[in-house]
Image (cartoon, rainbow, N blue to C red):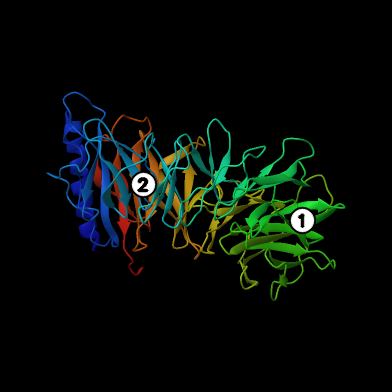
Amino acid sequence: MTRTRWTALIAVAALATVAGCSDGAESELPVRSAPLPAEVRGLGAAVLAVPVADERRSDLVGLLAVDRFGDDVAGVTPVRRHVDLALGDPRFPTVARGLAEDRRDALLVGGRLRDVTLPEHTYAREVTGVAAGLSITGSRCLTVTGEGAIAQPSVEASCTAAELGGVMWQDRPRTGYGGIDLKTGAASPPVTVPSYPIAASADGRYLAALSKDRPRRLVVADTSNGRSRPTVELGGGTVQGAMTEGGFAVLHLVDRQRTVSVVAPDGAVRTLLSPVGEVAFAPDGSRALVVDTRSDSRRLAVLDLSTGAVTPVADLPPMTGSVTATVSGDTALVVDVPFGPDSGEPTPRPTRAWSVRLAEATATPQPNPPAASAVLVRKTDTPPAVASTVSAVMFQPGGETLTLSPDGTVTTTPPGATPTASLGGGAVLHTLVDSDGEERADRVLVTDGSGGATEVSTGAGDDQRVDRVILTPDGGHLLFSLRPTRPRGQPSDLDAVVVARRDGSGEPVVVYRGAVLAGLGVEQTSTP
C-alpha cells in the first residue's frame, strides 16, 4: 500500500470519528470507521462485543460476527443480543453467557462463534490465555480449550496462574486446592495444603505450598492420592524452584551449602547439585541454569532436573563477579557484574551478558551491555504460565533493561520504559510515562532483537486506555483495543479497535468504533 492510500484511510477514519461523536451517536454504534489497510495481512474472522439498542435498557452487550476482521458492520445483525462476556486476548478461546430473553451461551474460538451450554452458575467477565489454545476464567472459573472442551472444577472455584508456574484452582470457602492440566484443561481433585500454592505441575497432579510455621517448610502435594507432608526447610526470602518430574525442584540450604534438590510428595529428597551459586529455573521444570561452584571454578552450567546431569556451557570463561540470571522458555539471560571496590558508594562497572540455550548448553554474547553496580531480575505481576509473559533484568543505577522473550529473543529497553508483554516474533511491548511519571495511553514502545526501539501512536485520547495490543501476523502492524478509562455498562464511542504501523510511521487508523474485539482468527503469513 502506498503512503497516499494509508493517508486517505486516515482521513476517512477521522471524518467518521467526528461524525460519530455528534449527539445521538450511541444509537448508531458500532460503526466501521475505515476499511482495514490492504497491507495488513493474516487477520481472519472476528467477533465484536457491541452495544445493543433496547427500549427498556441501555446496558445490553451483544455479539456481532464478521467473516474477516475489517469487514463492514452496517446492517449486520448481532448473533447474540445480551451476554456476559469473558474478555481477554481475543486470539484465545473464551465464552459468553446468554442472558434475559436470549439465553444461548457461546464459545468463541479463532474468531468464530459456536453454540454451547455452559455449566450453571458460570460467571464470565475475564479470561486469561495460559497455554497454546487453553484459557481460564476467574471467579466461578471455567477452563476452555481450542477444541471446544469446557470444564468447571467446582461451582465456586476460582482459577489462577501460580507464582512459580502452572495453573491452580481454589475451592470456596478455601477448603481445597487443585491443579489444571495445561494440555486438556482437566482439573485435578482438590487437596488440603497449609497455604496458597506457589506452583502446580503442567499436568495438574502436583502442588507446592509453604507451611505456616517457622522455619518455613516446603509442602508438596499429590492430588491423585491426597498425600502431602512438610519437607525441607526454606529461608524467609523468595522461594526459587519449579515443578519437575516427580516433585518440586528447589534451592535450599544443606549444612549451610546452597543446594538444588527435588522433593517428592512423600518427603523423599533427591539432591542434584551442591554447592551451587546462582540458580535460575526453567518454568517448565526441565532444566536450570547454575553457577557450578564445586571446584571453585564458578562456571555456568545447565542442570538437568530429571537426571541430575550437569553440562558446562560451551566456550564460556568462569564468572568473575555477581551473577544474575532469568529464564524464559528454553533460554536463560545471564549478566556478570565484576566485584567492585569495598567502598561506601556503588560504582558502575563494565558487565558481560549472554543468552544461553539450555537444551544445547550453548551461549551467545550480548553486545555492549550497560555498565552497572548491580543487576536485578525485574519483578512482574504476570506468572510464568501466562502466554504473554516476558522476563527482564534491570541494570542499576542507570535503569536500562534487557528483556527475554519465550522464543529466546533478547531486546534492550531504555530507561523510562517498562516491559509489559511479549508480542511474539521477538517483539516486546513497553509502556511509557509522561513528565509527571504517569503511564501514557497515547504511545507505546516496541523493541526487537535487532536493537530497534520504536514509539508507536495508539490513537488513544485522554479518556481512553490501551486494553490490549496484538502484533498482526504480517509482523508489520499493531492492533490496539482502546477502552474508556471509566468503565461503562456497554461499549461506547470510547471503545475502538485501531491499527497502526509497527515502524511508527503514519497515523493510527480507527477500524471499528463502539466495539470491543472479543474473538479473532489469525492466519499464517510470511513477514516482510
Residue 324 showing in the rendered view: no
- The total of numbered circles placed on residues is 2
Q: Kindly identify the residue that appears in the image at 25 percent across and 53 percent down.
A: 69
Q: Which residue lies furthest to the right in this view?
A: 255
Under tag 2, what secondary structure?
A: strand
Q: Please provide percent x and percent y for residue 247.
A: 67, 55
User: Residue 269 got which mark?
Assistant: 1
Given the image, on which type of amino acid does mark 1 rest? Answer: Val
**Quarter of the image containing the N terminus?**
bottom left
Q: Is the residue marked by circle 1 packed among few (<14), some (14-19), or many (20+) residues within 10 Å?
A: some
Quarter holding residue 362: bottom right
Please tell me the numbered disc located at residue 277: none
Callout 2 amino acid: Thr
- The residue under the point 80% across, 55% down is 258
Mark 2 to mark 1: distance in Å?
A: 41 Å
Q: In this view, does 406 lie to the left or right of 210?
A: left
Q: How crowded is mark 2: few (under 14 residues within 10 Å), some or many (20 or more)?
A: many
Residue 459 placement (x, y as % from top left): 33, 44
Q: In which quarter of the image is the C terminus?
A: bottom left
> Can you give x and y, in whole percent of width and height, for residue 380 in the image?
57, 46
Residue 94 is labelled as 2
